[in-house]
Image (cartoon, grey):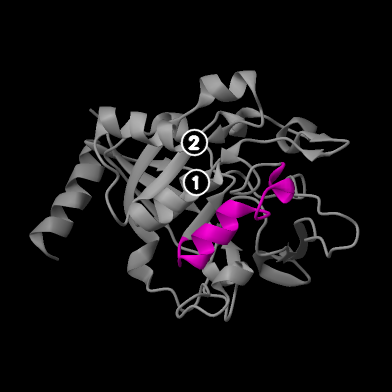
Amino acid sequence: MSKLLMQLVEELNRGSLRVVDLTQPLSPDTPILPLPAQFNNTPKFRIWELSHYDARGPAWYWNAFETGEHTGTHFDAPIHWISGKDLPNNSVDRIPPSQFIGPACVIDIIAKVAGNPDYLVVPSDISQWEAQHGRIKPGSWLLLRTGWSRRGGADYINLKDDGPHTPGFAKESSELLAKERNILGVGVETVGTDAGQAATFNPPFPNHYLMHGSGKFGLAGLANLDQLPPTGAVVIAAPLKIVNGSGSPVRVIAIVSSS
């Protein structure tokens, strides 16, 4: 083992570094984004027992499960959106695994979301963050801390008569992050990387359109972003290697300094 890798293991064992789980539990209670009735909706997570040290399998316990690719804490690949359908290495099985790891930049908009659940991150939010913490480096994960993961049940989707109401990114911010900052992708605490009302935007779902059209990724359904500093954490988000998969439930972790 190289000295660098050995040092990483030693720092983790010593407690100088710690691992933060950014993943929400996946169960039949996991909220699902409701699409209009004319579209196919993703199935809710379903799990059933195959054996439990019994006649069905005397020495083992295991389950089977069924779910959509974009359920719970999940990874969006470029092929997920029409703008990324013709890009190379655009599905989860073809993305180079080195791209699942990157430094995290965490932008906190909790106060703004508290007064407006439809709040959109605008370029001035990004420039203000950079004035404090430095320019966002290429290959970073841009994580949006909204406090939304503390919500449960119906409050998480926040569905009204005109659709969901959740925060997200203005089109101009997604374009800046994808094209001018060349990030790996964005991560959010909400059910999807676009705002709840994004179906009404121009173009519809602009973060999906611009990020995936630029070969970038999305992480949705994150948790525990309050345990990450604005900079300095490393995020690892490796999806299942589904052939031609548009995404995957994912266990997202971050490595942070304990000091």
Q: Position of residue 86 (x, y in %)?
A: 54, 80
The residue where tag 1 is placed is 172
Above or below, 182 against 82 in this view is above
Above or below, 203 against 239 in this view is above
Q: Position of residue 240 (x, y in %)?
A: 53, 69
Q: Amino acid at mark 2?
A: Val
Q: Is residue 213 magenta?
A: yes
> Which dot marks residue 122?
2
Q: Is residue 168 magenta?
A: no
Decide which of 228, 193 is in the foreground and name it: 193
Q: Position of residue 229 (x, y in %)?
A: 33, 31
Which span of residues is magenta-colored?
A: 197-216
Q: Give the residue displayed 51% in from the left and 72% down from the top.
A: 92
Q: Give the residue displayed 53% in from the left and 38% down from the top.
A: 223
Using the rendered view, name the quadrant where residue 160 is placed: top right
In the image, taking residue 4 as reference, residue 55 lies left or right, namely: right
Identify the image quadrant of the C terminus: top left
